[in-house]
Amino acid sequence: GQAALARQQAAQRAEAGRRTAGPDTGALIPGPRREFLEAFDTTPSRPAAPVAPEEPAWTPDVPDGPEGEAAPAAKSGKGRTFTGIAAAAVTTVLAVVVAGQVAQDPGAGTDGRESAGVDRQDSEDASRSVDRTAPQTRRQEAETLTYAQKMATAFPLAADLKASGKFDAVQGLAKAPGKGHKYRYRIDVEQGLGLDSGLFAEAVQKTLNDDRSWAHNGAMTFERISSGEPDFVITLASPGTTADWCEKSGLDTTEDNVSCDSAATDRVMINAYRWAQGASTFGPDKLLAYRQMLINHEVGHRLGHNHVSCRTPGALAPVMQQQTKTLDLDGVKCRPNPWVHPGR
């Protein structure tokens, strides 16, 4: 009996040693049951249980249920873990592919503005802005004013303006159209006036060669040049510069802001303020006629004519009358007149 008891106690001690042996002994420590791990392996904070190599990573097929319907798959925790990992991998691959396509897209904006619609919005706004322009306004802008319309239009210019004092010659040649003695002239326009020098040059040539002017009946003809030696220089200048050049000939143009023929020089000075704004004696509705008078009057001085006053009430004033200042001299009131030989 004692021998049997000793063998039983020895067997119990050996069994206890196997259960408490550590890693150094090579003995296995029993772990949690597999059913317990599978029941809790969906918990995010717990790592998935390792999968033994001999076990499949998927749930075996389950036989069809009644009436040929497929029975619901009884997925294990390991199957769900594998499915989640696979889905994450596919999502990552798709993200990389999409990012690569965007980077290689030649139409994509380099700074992200196009994807945000900024450039498109700006271009659409610009198009709508253009489309809002009224057709009538477009037609008006496209219309070219005639010579007469331009000559009847006032231009902004200050009465006390003194510009650069430097002149530009209007380029080109306008041949003398008539017979008689030929006068060759050049046109200079002061820099900084902002006026149409082409219109001024055209007006001078047309006015002087009109049969109602000094060219009447072929008495003389006028030719505009831009190089060579002219007989005189018709100069469009600011009020301040006009005063400086007229003073060279002992003339004061500051009173009434008038023009002059600076006889001591080669310049016939046309005051740009008067050219742009006209005079109250002619009024705003006769600006074309006033500009014609201005040219004829000052060139008339260069041709040797002095001032003449009107003597008959209601008659046309002589072109050599100082019509910029007044049409009423010594109680005789006359009508404005731009021509040397006006039609009666």
Image (cartoon, rainbow, N blue to C red):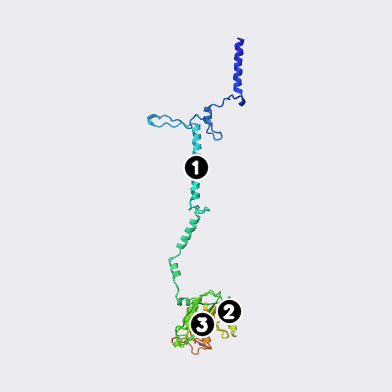
Q: Earlier in the sequence, mark 1 or mark 3?
A: 1
Q: Residue at x 39, y 29 (%)?
A: 66
Report which residue position mark 3 lands on.
185
Residue at 59% x, 81% y: name it.
244
* In-front residue for pair 324/84: 84
Instruction: Tell me which residue sits at (50%, 40%) in the image.
Output: 89
Q: Is residue 68 left or right of residue 22?
A: left
Residue 210 pos. (x, y %): 45, 83
Which one is nearer the viewer's eye here, 322 or 114? 114
Amino acid type at image mark 1: Val
- For the question of whether residue 279 can be seen, the reply is no
Q: Secondary structure at mark 1?
A: helix
* Mark 3 surroundings within 10 Å by alpha-carbon count, few (fewer than 14), some (14 through 19), many (20 or more): many
Rendered-image quadrant of the N terminus: top right
Q: CA distance from mark 1 to mark 2?
A: 81 Å
Residue 93 numbered tag:
1
Is residue 34 placed above or below 331 in the rendered structure?
above
**Mark 2 and mark 1 in contact (Cβ < 8 Å)?**
no
Where in the figure is residue 319, as x and y percent of width and height? 50, 86
Q: For mark 2, what is the residue?
A: 241
Cα distance in 3D space between marks 2 and 3: 20 Å
Q: Which of the marked residues, 1 or 2, is nearer the chain's N terminus?
A: 1
Q: Nearer the viewer, mark 2 or mark 3?
A: 3
Q: Residues within 10 Å of mark 2 (few under 14, many from 20)?
A: many
Observer-side mark, 1 or 2, equals 1
Query: Which of the pair 266/269 is nearer the observer?
Result: 266
Q: Amino acid at mark 3?
A: Tyr
